[in-house]
Image (tube, rainbow, N blue to C red):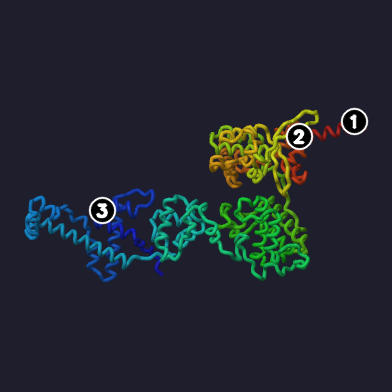
């Protein structure tokens, strides 16, 4: 077997390059036009070397085709035959006043004047013409066609090829696969490859699509935001594979129609004949009538869909069972699986559901996430049992992973860390985006709202209230009506400073200052004012937009901190701000009890169904605990005496 380095393939750019050289175009300009790569410097020696290599390849090909004369012809450097720029016959006749002479007389006079120079120029013109014909013949006869298994170095510039190879794409096939799976920004994350080089690569594949047999999809040539619903839908075919639940096809033997634990169908209250139908019924009742990418799909529904989807895929692809045939031992195996899913089950969070790179997991689930998973699945099977679809719940007896730390204790910011964030907000730029971002962060901290709750809040949810306190004094304020988990409504008081800031932003963009004005009802709390269409309310900020903006701000803020402060702020998210609100509200300013809020009020603010959930945020100070126990003992000892 020949392990020699393969000969670099000639490309159509090489033929165009030599064709231009033969016609007298400056070699450096030819290189710029046909062979120069993005950000590559033009080197005269490199250009001369390239010309010599291409001509030698042309000559070798001509000899292989038994055309030795053509081989000698193609090696002639026409540029060495000096072009004297002689006048044409008409120009000569006009200059010499020979317009009335015959053509033969003019030709003779021309030869008398220029003689050998004219013959030499004529020969040069003929030579250029013959070389162009030779290049055209060679391009037809020897122009190679790329194949999927060809090394990238055979077809792409050396520097570009080496970068692709280093990124795990040594062949044309692997590059095309990357482009088609990642889309328009396939090059993101590959060192030293930007949009310009990426466009060069895509152009190559488009030009050689017929010989490669690997078409580049339309979606890979435009931003994801420009893709139509039909284009997205076509990216992932329906299959029994690692695909989103809406693309999953259940094999007849595993669809659950004859599941081991199915209840008699005549007693079932669900319009479901198989496991996928039953799951969709559960999701619909949980508030998920929307499509997978619909903005109206709420966060709770997405979380429930994710857990049901993962289990259904595992049941089919790993356990080889219908979901309605899973028993307690299967539930225990699944609990172990989510703690360490295989690599091929994992992908990046950024991979959208319509992408071929989508996967059910990002990696192993932390203990808290495992607890949530098992709780949701226990709820799913309880629902299916209550509706007489199943006769058993395999997750009901499963032991939950231990929760070693109090809720929020590792996902809450300290007072010092929050003060650093607050100071950074005060020093931020005076732009609409910066003000909106600051408003979001302050509202999350002040109210403990969930991401979806604040994203969906509008001025129409704000209400001015006047109530009488225990001292018979009138208290004025503003509350926000929030629809939380389980469709439970709650009223959350909003600090006056936040209302004043929102009022200022409304007036800045031509809306009434009073947040309770009827005309403001449709204006989102986190309105994107500059994106508003004429005569219409501004659109709100999406969940993902808020999350990304807060994350980026925390990254910048953390850069000025050190140690634990830096590490905590780097990890902070919108939900961390909810935990921070709970922790600071219940524990007071640096543990000062007088500044703490009563547990029932914090529970109402957060929308917790259980007081125990709210109580988990209380952080007992050991010194205070010891002192309190001493007081308890002393007081009770005195009573006994």
Q: Going from the N terminus, do you reach mark 2 or mark 3 first?
A: 3
Q: Is residue 176 visible?
A: yes
Q: Is residue 268 left or right of residue 307?
A: right
Residue at left offset 67%, top offset 53%: 301
Q: Is residue 467 above or below residue 149?
A: above
According to the picture, the residue beneath numbered tag 1 turns out to be 638
Q: Which mark is in front, 1 or 3? A: 3
Please report the residue visible at 79 percent of the width from the left and 35 percent of the height from the top. Answer: 626
Which mark, by number, is residue 220? none
**x then y, percent, for residue 624:** 77, 34
Give the total number of marks visible in the rendering.
Answer: 3
Identify the secondary structure beneath mark 3: loop
Q: Position of residue 78 (x, y in %)?
A: 21, 57
Where is residue 384 drawn, in percent x and y?
Answer: 74, 61
Question: Quick one: 42 or 24, which is closer to the camera?
Answer: 24
Determine the CA span between mark 2 and mark 3: 87 Å
For residue 419, what is the image quadrant? top right
Residue sticking out furthest to the right: 641
In this figure, which residue is indicated by the disc labeled 2?
A: 623
Rendered-image quadrant of the N terminus: bottom left
Q: Is residue 429 above or below residue 122?
A: above
Instruction: Determine the residue positioned at 65% across, 32% down.
Output: 497
The residue that mark 3 highlights is: 25
């Amino acid at each position: 077997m020949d392990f020699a380095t393969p000969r670099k393939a000639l490309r159509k750019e090489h033929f165009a390059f030599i064709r231009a050289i033969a016609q007298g175009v400056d070699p450096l300009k030819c290189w710029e036009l046909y062979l120069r790569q993005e950000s590559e410097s033009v080197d005269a020696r490199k250009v001369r070397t390239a010309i010599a290599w291409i001509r030698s390849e042309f000559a070798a090909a001509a000899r292989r085709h038994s055309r030795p004369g053509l081989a000698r012809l193609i090696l002639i450097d026409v540029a060495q035959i000096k072009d004297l720029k002689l006048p044409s016959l008409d120009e000569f006749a006009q200059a010499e006043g020979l317009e009335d002479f015959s053509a033969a007389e003019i030709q003779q006079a021309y030869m008398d004047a220029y003689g050998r120079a004219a013959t030499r120029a004529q020969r040069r013109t003929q030579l250029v013409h013959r070389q162009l014909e030779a290049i055209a013949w060679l391009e037809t006869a020897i122009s190679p066609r790329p194949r999927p298994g060809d090394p990238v170095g055979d077809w792409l510039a050396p520097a570009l090829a080496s970068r692709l190879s280093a990124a795990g794409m040594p062949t044309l096939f692997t590059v095309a696969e990357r482009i088609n799976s990642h889309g328009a920004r396939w090059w993101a994350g590959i060192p030293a490859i930007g949009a310009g080089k990426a466009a060069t690569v895509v152009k190559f594949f488009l030009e050689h699509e017929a010989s490669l047999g690997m078409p580049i999809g339309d979606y890979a040539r435009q931003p994801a935001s420009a893709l139509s619903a039909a284009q997205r839908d076509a990216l992932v075919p329906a299959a029994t594979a690692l695909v989103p639940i809406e693309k999953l096809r259940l094999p007849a033997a595993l669809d659950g129609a004859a599941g081991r634990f199915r209840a008699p169908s005549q007693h079932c209250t669900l319009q479901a004949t198989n496991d996928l139908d039953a799951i969709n019924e559960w999701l619909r009742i949980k508030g998920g009538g929307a499509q997978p990418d619909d903005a109206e799909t709420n966060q709770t529904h997405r979380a429930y869909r994710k857990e049901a989807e993962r289990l259904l895929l595992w049941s089919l692809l790993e356990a080889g069972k219908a979901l309605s045939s899973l028993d307690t031992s299967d539930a225990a195996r699944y609990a172990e699986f989510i703690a360490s899913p295989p690599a091929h089950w994992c992908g990046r969070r950024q991979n959208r559901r319509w992408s071929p790179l989508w996967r059910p997991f990002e990696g192993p689930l932390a203990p808290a996430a495992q607890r949530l998973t098992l709780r949701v699945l226990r709820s799913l099977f309880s629902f299916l049992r209550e509706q007489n679809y199943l006769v058993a719940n395999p997750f009901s007896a499963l032991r939950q992973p231990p929760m070693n730390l109090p809720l929020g204790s590792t996902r809450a910011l300290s007072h010092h860390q929050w003060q650093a964030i607050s100071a950074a907000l005060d020093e931020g730029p005076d732009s609409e985006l910066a003000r909106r971002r600051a408003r979001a962060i302050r509202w999350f901290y002040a109210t403990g709202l969930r991401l979806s709750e604040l994203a969906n809040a509008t001025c129409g949810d704000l209400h001015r209230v006047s109530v009488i306190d225990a001292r018979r004094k009138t208290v004025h304020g503003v509350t926000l009506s929030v629809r939380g988990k389980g469709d439970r409504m709650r009223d959350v008081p909003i600090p006056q400073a936040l209302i004043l800031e929102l009022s200022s932003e409304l007036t800045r963009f031509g809306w009434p200052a009073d947040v309770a004005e009827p005309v403001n009802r449709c204006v989102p709390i986190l309105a994107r004012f500059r994106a508003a269409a004429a005569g219409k309310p501004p659109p709100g900020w999406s969940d993902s937009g808020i999350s990304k903006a807060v994350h980026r701000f925390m990254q910048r803020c953390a850069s000025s901190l050190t140690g634990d402060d830096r590490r905590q702020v780097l990890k902070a998210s919108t939900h961390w701000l909810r935990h921070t609100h709970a922790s600071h509200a219940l524990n007071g300013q640096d543990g000062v009890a007088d500044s703490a809020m009563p547990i029932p009020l914090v529970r109402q603010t957060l929308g917790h169904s259980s007081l125990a959930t709210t109580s988990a945020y209380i952080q007992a100070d050991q010194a205070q605990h010891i002192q309190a126990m001493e007081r308890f003992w002393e007081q009770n000892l005195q009573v006994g005496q």
